Amino acid sequence: MNGDYFKPTSVRLAEALERARQQWRMRRDEMQLLPTPRQTLGPHHPPFTIALNGDAGIDAHAVAQAVGERLGWPVYDHELVEQIAREMGIRTELVASLDEKRMNWLEELFQALFTGEMVSETVYVHHLAQTLFALAAHGECVVVGHGASQILPPATTLRVRLVGPSNDRILAVQRRCGWSREEAQRWVEQVDRERNAFVQEHFHKDPADPAHYDLILNAFRFSPAQCADLIVATLHQLQATAAAPPPTR
């Protein structure tokens, strides 16, 4: 298991982003040393990233943690919001209010009036994309939500979606939060609606379209441990396929 797994997640995230920046600088310098465009550095297989997201009411983080433990990979979820808040120089709560939600200009204006800080959703998405691409450049990590399944390159990303019947998701929220069924149902429907609108608005993709995923699992038919086993097995298949030499003619 990777020793970095036991570091605080925020520390691992900062280190991963710095390693990604160093890799980009090294690749840029290497390309500048090439005498002709035809000369290459040999076959290269970028490391994989796992992008995992789930419907509202599903504990996607528990599945991600189980995957991270099996692979020795760090898991990035709420830490992404904290990192982006540091880069934007604003409070984490303000960035969290934008995360995976669609915010119109009037809401942005009211937020600026009441908080004294102008937080543009467009600027947030820009920072989010930069952070996700930096993590993917380093690879070997699990990203939960944040549009990663829609924005990261499919060639090096295992895109996983966790689904479940609406009634099961509502009951799960009731048990977790101690809410009434009506409260849990409103929350599930609102979160699903906000997440879908965010992805469609900024990434121009339908997050419910199965074509955007490599693996779709019913999180109420399989336990988090079973989901993790299936995800890791699929990852190993993709890694083996990527490492295989191209067929000869």
Image (cartoon, rainbow, N blue to C red):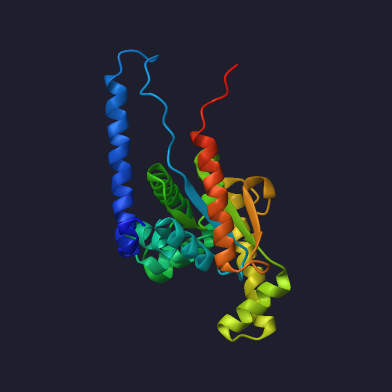
User: At 57% across and 49% down in the image, what residue appears?
Assistant: 234
Of residues 82 and 101, the one nearer the viewer is: 82
Instruction: Establish if 153 lies above or below 121.
Output: above
Q: Residue at x 63, y 51 (%)?
A: 215
Q: Nearer the viewer, residue 62 or 234?
A: 234
The mark total stands at: 0
Residue 94 visible in the displayed image: yes
Looking at the picture, how far across and down is residue 26, in whole percent?
28, 33
Q: Residue at x 28, y 48 (%)?
A: 18
Decide if residue 190 is on the left or right side of residue 20: right
Where 227 sits versus 242, above or below?
A: below
| Residue 118 in sight here | no
Quarter of image, res 161 = bottom right
x, y percent for residue 179: 61, 85
**Relative image position of residue 151 (x, y in whole percent):** 52, 45
Of residues 227 and 214, the one nearer the viewer is 227
Locate the C terminus and report the quarter of the image it occupies.
top right
Give the residue at x 34% y 13%.
36
Q: Which quadrant, please, contains the N terminus?
A: bottom left
Position in image of residue 185 (x %, y %):
68, 76
